[in-house]
Image (cartoon, coloured by chain):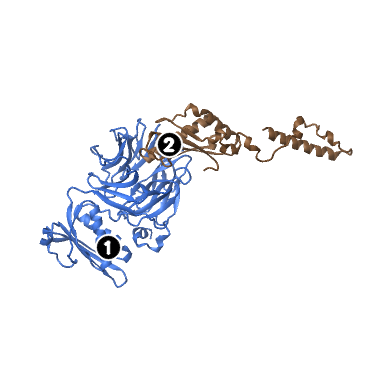
């Protein structure tokens, strides 16, 4: 029930309405500011069937694929196709499309709908994917995202992120909201509204919970918030500051930063707040812990060497190993889902940039030319990095592909957005 | 303090007066009653004792915390760039606060450290903590009790100013002392 509710939020199911604070007014808008070098030309024909729904569905599929920066949409005006007839492959090839998607949406006797689609390879002149999906009228967007995911996966070999969610904090007029929206910015809902700051949201591996730091008690306290029920509990409120929650890959533990023993140091505890255990020791500041996806290491920021740098320590025990050696400020380590890359923030001449490191070669690449980057977060397919930055004095989110080419900007009108966290794939 | 002492003397004297008057069969001589054995301070009996409001003159009373003429109303300690050492200019202020805490053992203090907005939020939270911790350590050295003190950080989250200038950043390098009732 919990998963069902979480997954079909777009449907606004009554059972879920109570979980969240009433619909946030401010919508996240996303624009492409840079596209990939070799965009795959694809034609998405207007879906047939129920006029209004079909148009809405087609529009979402097209937006998703365009926003990814990997596809060039080929014009399909005037063409009405359905998934049952074989398309004129030669014609579509001459229009420049390497792939063609066709589909339709039909009403079912029980009041629901069925959307069918086919994806064709115009070169091989064959259908390469197809699906029939039953859904309610409230699930048009969700179904469109699933189709876009399927097209994306078939054409790129990577899993699509169009059905995922992002969490972020919106600040406006002295009010803070922890919001969760679809990856396209649609349907934002506030999990928490507060007069005091909220930072460091972190998704549980199964996507059912968010850990975060709230200052509502006039000091930083770590909460764990169940998204389906809206209920939360305090995971860490020891004497001093409690912050930087990071989930273990099995979802059973949180690494946190506590100052209860003097300075900011790393601890591990059970999600319910019990069993606190210190995991590292230094005479400086240790913070921003992050588990590697295989659960073997905890990466973290430490200034034990004189300046903030990134280290990692085996979870099973052993000495910390320094990872970053360039420059005098490297912070906020975040591992890619395949564990092969790390994104982090470096400071150079007072400017803060999202940077990515290949862990095997230790080669790094600065990915942005904005100057106040923070909080990078990998998409669950590892292709894009979502982060916070400032443009024109305003807090915005941005996303960049790991090769630096595709760029997006995500803004909320009349508000500052910060602290993004990309949610996991739904199981 | 003097007025409290005076009040208690007067009360003791009055009680004594009534007791003396009650136990003998001789009529009391009111004019000499003030010279009872407990009365060591002839002024005590005749002193008018104001009731509440008198604590505004008590330099370590609760009202002192909000009295702009009292150093205890000053709650902020500012730090130099990249420094977590409490400067000498704040020592006497901290001494006053330590004394207040000693005389008001029921009061607790929350020390909130801050940092400017440049860089990672979590790292700045830790930098703010260092400032709060420095203030707490100074208070402990001056007689403050661990049980009355908690040092926490607000990092860059509650800036005193928004400009991206040296002057503004200097404002943010600060620890603030809050007392029970203020947090």
User: Could you tell me residue B34's position as x and y percent?
Assistant: 80, 34
Q: Residue at x 33, y 47 (%)?
A: A396
Give me the disc on residue A424: none
Give the labeled residue for mark 2: B172
Q: Tell me which chain the residue with mark 2 is part of.
A: B
Mark 2: few/some/many CA within 10 Å (<14, 14-19, 20+): many
User: Could you tell me residue A332's position as x and y percent?
Assistant: 33, 40
In the rendered view, does A338 fall on the left or right side of A274? left
**Placement of A79 over or under B4, stated as above or below:** below
**Which tint was used for chain A?**
blue
**Nearest to viewer (mark 2 / mark 1):** 2
Residue at the right extreme? B26
**Placement of A143 over or under A210, stated as above or below:** below
Kindly indicate which chain is depicted in brown in the rendered structure.
B
Give me the disc on residue A56: 1
Q: Is residue A54 in sight in this rendering?
A: yes
The quadrant in which the N terminus of chain B is found is top right
Disc 2, SS:
helix
| Spatial CA span between label 2 and label 1 | 49 Å
Disc 1, SS:
helix
Work out whether residue B70 or residue A135 is closer to the camera in this orientation and state it: B70
Q: Tell me which chain the residue with mark 1 is part of.
A: A
Task: Name which quarter of the figure residue B40 lies in.
Answer: top right
């Amino acid at each position: 029930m919990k998963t069902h509710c979480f997954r079909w939020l777009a449907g606004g199911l009554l059972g879920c309405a109570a979980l969240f604070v009433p619909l946030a007014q401010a919508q996240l808008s996303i624009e492409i500011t840079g596209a990939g070098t070799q965009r795959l030309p694809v034609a998405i024909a207007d879906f047939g069937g129920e006029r209004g729904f079909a148009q809405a569905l087609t529009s979402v599929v097209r937006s998703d694929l365009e926003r990814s920066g990997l596809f060039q949409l080929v014009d399909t005006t005037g063409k009405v196709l359905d998934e049952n007839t074989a398309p004129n492959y030669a014609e579509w090839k001459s229009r420049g499309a390497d792939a063609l998607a066709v589909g339709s949406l039909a009403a079912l006797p029980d009041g629901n709908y069925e959307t069918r689609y086919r994806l064709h390879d115009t070169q091989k002149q064959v259908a390469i994917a197809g699906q029939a999906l039953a859904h309610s009228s409230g699930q048009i967007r969700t179904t469109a995202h699933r189709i876009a995911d399927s097209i994306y996966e078939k054409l790129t070999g990577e899993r699509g992120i169009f059905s995922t969610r992002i969490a972020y904090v919106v600040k406006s007029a002295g009010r803070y909201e922890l919001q969760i929206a679809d990856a396209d910015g649609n349907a934002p809902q506030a999990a928490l509204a507060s007069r005091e700051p909220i930072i460091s949201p972190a998704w549980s591996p199964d996507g059912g919970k968010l850990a975060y730091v709230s200052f509502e008690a006039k000091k930083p306290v770590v909460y764990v918030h169940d998204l389906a029920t809206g209920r939360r509990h305090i995971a860490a409120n020891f004497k001093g500051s409690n912050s930087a929650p990071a989930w273990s890959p099995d979802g059973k533990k949180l690494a946190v930063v506590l100052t209860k023993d003097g300075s900011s140091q790393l601890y591990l505890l059970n999600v319910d707040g019990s069993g606190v255990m210190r995991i590292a020791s230094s005479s400086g500041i240790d913070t921003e812990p992050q588990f590697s996806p295989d659960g073997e290491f905890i990466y973290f920021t430490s200034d034990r060497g004189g300046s903030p740098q990134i280290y990692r320590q085996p979870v099973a025990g052993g000495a910390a190993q320094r990872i970053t050696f360039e420059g005098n400020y490297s912070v906020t380590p975040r591992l890619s889902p395949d564990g092969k890359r790390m994104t982090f923030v470096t400071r150079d001449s007072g400017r803060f940039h999202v940077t990515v490191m290949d862990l095997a070669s230790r080669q790094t690449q600065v990915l942005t030319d904005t100057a106040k980057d923070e909080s990078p977060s990998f998409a669950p397919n590892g292709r894009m990095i979502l982060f916070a930055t400032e443009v024109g004095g305003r807090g915005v989110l941005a996303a960049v592909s790991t090769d630096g080419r595709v760029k997006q900007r995500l803004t909320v009108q009349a508000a500052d957005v910060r602290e993004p966290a990309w949610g996991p794939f739904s199981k | 303090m003097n007025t409290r002492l005076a009040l208690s003397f007067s009360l003791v004297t009055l009680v004594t007066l009534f007791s003396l008057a009650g136990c003998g069969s001789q009529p009391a001589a009111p004019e000499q009653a003030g010279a009872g054995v407990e009365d060591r301070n002839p002024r005590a009996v005749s002193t008018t004792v104001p009731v509440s409001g008198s604590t505004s003159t008590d330099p370590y009373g609760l009202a002192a915390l909000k009295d702009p003429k009292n150093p205890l109303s000053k709650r902020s300690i500012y730090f130099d760039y990249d420094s977590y050492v409490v400067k000498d200019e704040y020592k006497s202020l901290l001494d006053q606060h330590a004394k207040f805490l000693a005389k008001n053992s029921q009061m607790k203090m929350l020390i909130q450290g801050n940092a400017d907005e440049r860089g990672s939020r979590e790292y700045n939270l830790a930098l703010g903590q260092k400032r709060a911790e420095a203030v707490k350590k100074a208070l402990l050295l001056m007689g403050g009790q661990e049980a009355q003190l908690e040092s926490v950080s607000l990092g860059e989250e509650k800036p005193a100013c928004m400009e991206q200038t040296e002057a503004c950043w200097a404002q943010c390098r600060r620890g603030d002392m809050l007392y029970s009732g203020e947090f």
